[in-house]
Amino acid sequence: MDYEERDLLGESQLRHIYSLLNVQLSGYHEVGKWSVDWGIGTSLNSGEEPDRRQMLFQRDDDGRLKFFTNNLETYRYYGDLDESDYTFSSTASRHYDNGSVFKAGMSARFKNRNFSTLRYLYDVSKVRDSFEERILMDVNDILENEALVKVIRKQNARDRYDAWNVVGALFAEYDAVITEKFSANVGLRIEADRCRVDYNDDVEDTFRVLDSVDPFVALNLKYQLRDRQWLRLSLSRTITRPSFIEMAPFLYQETYGGAMLRGNAALKNAYNYNVDFRYECFPDNYSDKISATLYAKWLKSPIERIQRYSGGAPEHSFQNADSGYAAGVELELRKSITESLAFNANVSVMYTDVTLPEGGVYTNSERQLQGASPYIVNADVTYSPQFSRDRSLRMALVYNLTGPRIHSVGLSGLGDVIQRPIHDLDFTAGWTFRKGLTLSASVKNILDIPLEFVQSIPSVDQVVDIEGWRQGRSVNIGLKWTL
C-alpha cells in the first residue's frame, strides 16, 4: 500500500559489487623518555549496482494485476561509485617517573568520491490490460500507437556528483597522576576542515563548500573508591559533519519501492556537548566487569532526516534542527565463565527531545530526536581458546536489539516515519594458525527479520505500514596477514 492507498506489487532484481583495498603502515620508536608512533593508510573503495531491474504493478479491487503506469517506477538502473581515503597521524609522548604522560601530535585525512548513475525508464502506459483471443490477429491490433513499451534513456548532468573532504588537526593532552587514587586527563584538539560537493542543480553546474576551524576540549577524571572500584567523569565537545550523501542534492532511491532521497547542500556542522559519569567494578579479576553510566548530551544544530512531498511523491532529505538533548543510563556486565568462555551484556535506556525552529513546517512540535532509540540491548557469548603461542581460535555469537526510532521526520502534515524494533544476530570466527596469519569467517543477519516502517496520518488519526523488506543473510570469508 503506497501513500495514496493504492495496492501495489513490485518485482525487483538487483546485485551489488564491492571492492576494497586497504593498506596501512605504522611504526613505533623510543628515545629515552620519549616515544613516537606514527601511521599512514590508504583505502580505495568502489561500489557498482549494475542493472537494477524494477517493475511495479497495481492490484485492482477484483484482485487483477495491471502495470502501474508511472514510468518512474519501471526502470533499469546503473550506479557507479569510486572513493579514495588517505590518512596520516603522528604522536610524540613524554613519559614521567610518576606515571604521567604528555602527548602531542598531528593528523590529516583526505577523502574523495565520484558517483554517477544511468537510468532506462519504461513507459508502459500503452500496454493493454487484455487482448481478444482470435486465431488470426492483425499486428496493429497489438501494437497500438506505435509500440507497447517506450524506453527512455535518462542521464542528465544532475545524475552525478563529485565530493572531497580534508581534515587536519593538531592536538595535545596530558595524563596526570595526581595522587595514588586520583588521576586526570585533559586534552585540546584543533581541527581545520573543508568539504566541497560539486553537482548540478537542474539549471547549471554549481558547488557547495563547508569549512570550519574548531577547538575541542576534553576532560576525564578518574578516582579509585576502593580496590577494583572506580568513578569516572568525562566532559567533551565533539562535532558531527554532514556526510557526502547528506550534502549532495542528488536524487537516489535507497531501497526498492521506497521514497526517494535527496541531499541538502545548505546543511551545516552539528556540535555535541557530552557529560558521562560512570561507576566501574571488577569483582574477581579484571576480566569481569560491572559498570553503570549516567550520560547527557546537548546537541547544537543536529542533522535530522526529514520527509516531504515533491511533485506529489514522498521524498526524504536532511535538515538541521535548532538543538536537542539526550539523557540516559547504561548498564554493562562482563563475566568470564571459564578461561576461554565469556559473556557480555549491555543495556541502554535513553530519553531525547529536540527544539525546532519557530514558525517551521514540522508536523509534530514535540518529539524525540530522529534516529535515537529509547532502548538498546547488546549481548554476546565469546569462546576464545589459546592452543599455543601462535595458534588460537575466537568465536562469537552477537545479539543486538534496537528499539523503535524515528526514521524520517514528517513535514507539512506528514507524520513521522517510525522504524519498528530491530533484532539482529551475527556469528564471527577467527582462526590464527600461524604467526601473523588469521583465517576469518562470519555470518551476518542470521535471523533475517524484516525491516518495517510505519507512518502516522494525523488527519485521520491512523498509523499505516508503508515499507518493509528483508536484507538477507551474508557470509564472509577472509584471510589476514599481519607483518
Image (spheres, rainbow, N blue to C red):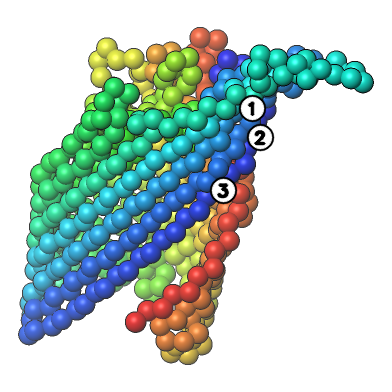
Q: Position of residue 483 (x, y in %)?
A: 34, 82
In three-dimensional space, the C-alpha distance between marks 1 and 3, rounded to whole angstroms, equals: 18 Å
Which quadrant would residue 369 be assigned to in this image? top left
Q: Is residue 287 visible?
A: yes
Tell me what residue is drawn at x 25 percent, y 15 percent.
358
Which residue is tagged 2? 11
SS at badge 3: loop
Front residue of this view, candidates 289 and 392 = 392
Q: Position of residue 478 (x, y in %)?
A: 50, 70
In three-dimensional space, the C-alpha distance between marks 2 and 3, rounded to whole angstroms, equals: 14 Å
| Image marks 2 and 3: residues in contact by CB distance under 8 Å | no
Tell me what residue is drawn at x 66 percent, y 21 percent.
147
In three-dimensional space, the C-alpha distance between marks 1 and 2, rounded to whole angstroms, equals: 6 Å
Within 10 Å of the Cα at label 2, are there few (<14), some (14-19), or many (20+) other Cα atoms? few
- In the picture as drawn, the residue positioned furthest to the bottom comes out as 388
- Classify residue 327 as left or right of residue 374: left
Which residue is tagged 1? 56
Mark 3: which amino acid? Arg
Q: Position of residue 87 (x, y in %)?
A: 23, 61
Tell me what residue is drawn at x 22 percent, y 47 percent.
165
Front residue of this view, candidates 114 and 452 = 114
| Image marks 1 and 2: residues in contact by CB distance under 8 Å | yes
Q: Position of residue 19 (x, y in %)?
A: 44, 59
Mark 1: which amino acid? Leu
SS at badge 1: strand
- Classify residue 236 as left or right of residue 146: left
Tell me what residue is drawn at x 11 percent, y 72 percent.
93
Where is 44 relative to 29, above or below?
A: above
Within 10 Å of the Cα at label 1, are there few (<14), some (14-19), or many (20+) other Cα atoms? many
Which residue is tagged 3? 15
